[in-house]
Image (cartoon, grey):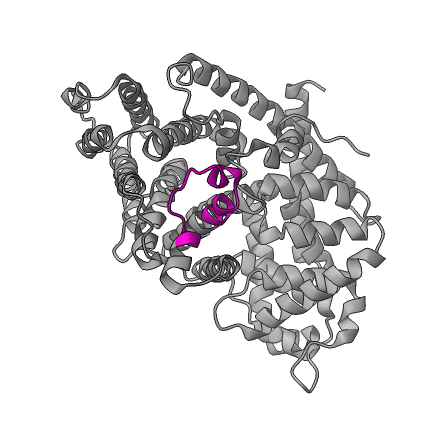
Amino acid sequence: MENKKVSEKILELKKEVKRNIIEVNDSVKSPSEKLELIDAIQRLGVSYYFEKEIEAVLLQMYNNLHDYDDQKCCDDDGLYIVALRFRLLRQQGHNASSDVFNKFKNNEGKFENSLASDIRGMLNLYEAAQLRVHGEKILDDAFIFTTTHLESIASQLSSPLLDQVNHSLKHPIRKSLQRREARHYMSMYHQDASHSEILLTLAKLDFNLLQKMHQKELSDITRWWKDFDYRSKQSFSRDRIVECYFWTLGVFFEAQNSRIRMIITKLIAILTIIDDIYDSFGTLEELEPFTEAIERFTTRLYPFTRWDICAVDQLPEYMKLCYKALLDLYIEIEEFSKGRSYCVGYAKKGLQKQVRAYFHEAKWLHQKHIPMLDEYMPIGLNNAGSFLLIVMAFIGMGDGVTKDSLDWVFTDPEPKMVRSMSIVGRVMNDIAYHKSDQRRSGHIVASAVECHMKQYGSTEQDAIDELSQQVSDAWKDLNEECLYPTTIPMPLLMRVIDLVRVNHEMYSEGDGFTQGMLLKDLLVSLLINPYIDT
């Protein structure tokens, strides 16, 4: 089917699905039908077409929970419905109470063992527990209970239930990339006898059409990278342009976000070079003026002022190339955000913060200094790049972001949302690096694991376990910050969640960014192979 005909078919199907949502909300259909429709739309990756309609359904459901008669009706709901409703409401930012799970506990305050036979209910309780915040012991217990039982029972299951359990344990919805979940769930939903053929067709056509666009963009960005040809001039830098594009795709997959995808991909590619300059190649005598040159980075105004080009003269050639590429890219960022001239200043501020952290860590490296964890973490968190990536994600939202929202990113003390993203990215990256062949080859850069072991005298495994707990706690902070009332608009917060999901995807099985084979199957499924019914 030609792209034009596919687009017309998608438009037609969107109208039908929208009618279905409105009809379900206005009817007296059972709560399970409403919940399952919303869940399917979201997991199939097409909820961005129906945000207002979905919010209307879930807001009404949330308000009904506070109505006495509806509360009495909910008392009869089983684990599957209670957990599914809780997750969908929490995902939407509505602070549904975790007390709804008390009825599934026995007199000893433990979850009833009989629940373990309800696989659908257990899966939904496991997914609901991913939305827990600090102080919700019942959901901490639910997470342990469901994880233990699902792992135990998996060997006794057969497909498709086995596939669902294994996928959820490895890629819970809250932490999973939207495109990964959509690709996986289409095959699961297809096997559900009660599935909506209209909705499934929409999801398949939309996924494959977007994939064609992503393939074209990847071809274009690869051509840009080859023309830049940095590796032929300096072989020390990583060649990871596909992974850079994938990083961006995890945050912006929609058709209308093509230009910002290209800009952020270029930025991550150049940042990778800069990271490698500081980590692997540059001398302190070279790095100091390079850092100063970026610190003197000035805003382009009309008539525009370029960066202080004089600062480049004292740099070696390989740094000049990188510096010039940054100049060109920031001019492109400024052109993208035309009409919002303040945006590029925040992007520069984020870059400067990150480069200062790079330089600080480079000094540790050259001094062969392993700092204490308390000394390392403030620098390591800035090195994670959260400030710059969040700013760029916000800039990509167009008129949806204001100067106040960009000011929020740099609030002192830093927002929990920003710090939590940094913790997830930095700690997971450091744990992956600590286990990597790169480290074993003798290339030692201070990581949170070594710093923890030095400060506390801990074993390697104890350090990893305690740092992993920091990641879990960071997710609780992220969940809490995404509940109404929020400090900034929810669409912006969800872009931060998507950035954290990319970090989680990149480093959950090792350093997926540097060791490309770890992501190979996922990249093939999202960027090469179209979805075909099996």
- Residues rendered magenta in the picture: 428-450
Q: Nearer the viewer, residue 204 or 230?
A: 230
Q: How many labels does the image show?
A: 0
Q: In this view, does 129 lie above or below 508?
A: below
The stretch drawn in magenta includes residue 338? no
Residue 75 appears at what percent x and percent y? 69, 77
Residue 138 at least partly seen: yes
Residue 65 at least partly seen: no
Residue 17 appears at what percent x and percent y? 68, 42
Picture quarter with the C terminus:
top right
Q: Nearer the viewer, residue 385 or 442?
A: 442
Q: Measuring 53% from the left and 27% from the top, which residue is drawn there?
A: 242
Q: Is residue 200 above or below residue 102?
A: above
Picture quarter with the N terminus:
top right
Q: Which of 98 and 85 is in front in this view?
A: 98
Q: Measuring 55% from the left and 68% from the top, which residue is drawn there?
A: 96
Q: Nearer the viewer, residue 234 or 427?
A: 234
Residue 458 appears at what percent x and percent y? 45, 63
Type of secondary structure dominating the magenta stretch: helix
Answer with left or right where residue 88 lies relative to residue 153.
Answer: left
Q: In this view, does 282 lie above or below 153?
A: above
Task: Name which quarter of the figure residue 236 lies in.
Answer: top left
The stretch drawn in magenta includes residue 433? yes
Answer with left or right where residue 458 lies relative to residue 219.
Answer: left
The single residue placed furthest to the bottom in the displayed view is 107
Residue 196 appears at what percent x and percent y? 77, 44
Q: Measuring 63% from the left and 40% from the top, which residue is drawn there?
A: 180
Answer with left or right where residue 318 lies relative to residue 143.
Answer: left
Task: Name which quarter of the figure residue 77 lies in.
Answer: bottom right
